[in-house]
Every structure is written in structure tokens, then in C-alpha cells.
Amino acid sequence: MTNTLQVKLLSENARMPERNHKTDAGYDIFSAETVVLEPQEKAVIKTDVAVSIPEGYVGLLTSRSGVSSKTHLVIETGKIDAGYHGNLGINIKNDAIASNGYIRPGV
């Protein structure tokens, strides 16, 4: 039995999730909006992407290995239940003490 992840782009700013390598454990997803995070500020970044997780499975939104090690932006792990079909949001915090964090569409 093959389970397929169905993806729907909700706006022109949405970008299709992608894998850099076919052996990657997950897909990269991208912001659909520009956001400036002040030091210690939290936000939910919209992706304008909806997915259909197969029944019996769960999706996880988590940080790419390079994001937290190269910036002060911290992605909080999020769970996507099979019954959720809305806009995926990325919970993010700027952990910096003095500098702003910048999020651009497609990143």
C-alpha cells in the first residue's frame, strides 16, 4: 500500500514543498510572507500550503539542521494531524538578544 502526501498551494506566494535529496527524511517548506522578528519575539509564519496527511500518520514541522545553528531563529516543532487541512503555520522565535530576524517569502 502506498500513501501519498497531497499538497495544495493556497496563494501565489506559496511554494511547493521540496526535498534537496531524494533520501531526505522530510520536505522543506517556505514562508509565504515577509516578517521581521524583534529580539525574543515569537510569531506564526504562514506558508499558504495545506496538506492531507494519510490517516494513521502524523506530520511534523521542525527546524532544518542549518537554520538554528546559523541564525538565532528557533523553530518550535509542530504536529499536523491527519484531519487538519488548513494553512500550515511555522511557530518561530527570534532568540537573539539585540538583533532582528528577517523572514522573506520563499525562504
Image: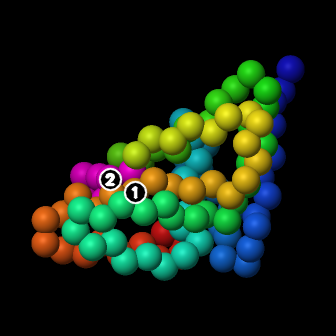
Which picture quadrant has residue 82?
top right
Query: Amino acid under label 2?
Result: Val
Could you say where residue 24 lies in the image, as x and y percent from the top left?
54, 40
Label 1: state its secondary structure: strand
The reply, left or right, for residue 76 in relation to residue 11 is: left
Q: Which residue is mark 2?
A: 74
Give above or below for 82 relative to 101: above
Q: Which residue: 30% across, 65% down? A: 41
Q: Report how far apart the C-alphas of labels 2 and 1 lie in the structure.
A: 6 Å
What range of the chain is rendered magenta?
A: 66-75
Callouts 2 and 1 close, C-beta under 8 Å = yes
Which structural element holds mark 2? strand
Magenta stretch containing residue 107, yes or no?
Answer: no
Query: What amino acid is labelled 1 in the image?
Result: Ile
Q: Residue at x 45, y 53 (%)?
A: 91
Q: Earlier in the sequence, mark 2 or mark 1?
A: 2
Residue 71 appearing in the image: no
Q: Quadrant of residue 70?
A: bottom left
According to the picture, the residue beneath numbered tag 1 turns out to be: 92
Residue 100 visible in the picture: yes
